Amino acid sequence: MRAIVFIKYDTIKTYVEKQGSKEEREEYGQMKLLDF
């Protein structure tokens, strides 16, 4: 179960870094702090 979460997390991280705007990256950073 945990592995799935990490794979999903990596996919989102990669997507946000490539596609995301600055605001999206900051929002994602805050989400990350809450989730992990």
Image: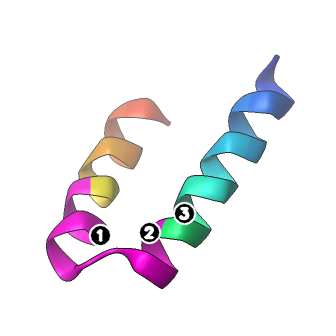
Total of numbered circles in the picture? 3
Residue type, label 1? Arg
The answer for how far apart the CA atoms under marks 2 and 3 are is 5 Å
Q: Position of residue 34 (x, y in %)?
A: 33, 34
- Mark 3 and mark 1 lie on one chain; the one further toward the N terminus is 3
Secondary structure predominantly adopted by residues drawn in magenta: helix
Disc on res. 13: 3
Q: Which residue position holds label 2? A: 16
Cβ–Cβ under 8 Å for marks 2 and 3: yes
Please determine whether, in this image, residue 22 is positioned above or below residue 1.
Answer: below
Residue found 68% across the figure and 42% down from its top: 8
Is residue 1 within the magenta segment? Answer: no
Cβ–Cβ under 8 Å for marks 1 and 2: yes
| Element assignment for label 2 | helix
Q: Position of residue 22 (x, y in %)?
A: 20, 80
The answer for how far apart the CA atoms under marks 1 and 2 are is 6 Å
Left or right of 31 on screen, residue 27? left
Please determine whether, in this image, residue 15 is positioned above or below residue 33.
Answer: below
Please determine whether, in this image, residue 2 is positioned above or below residue 21.
Answer: above
Q: Which residue position holds label 1? A: 25
Left or right of 31 on screen, residue 17? right
Residue type, label 3? Lys
Category of crowding for the residue at label 3, using alpha-carbon neighbours closer than 10 angstroms: few (below 14), some (14–19), many (at least 20): some
Residue lying at the far top in this picture: please name it. 1
Q: For the magenta stretch, what is the residue range?
A: 16-27
Residue found 80% across the figure and 30% down from its top: 4
| Element assignment for label 3 | helix
Residue 10: image quadrant is: bottom right
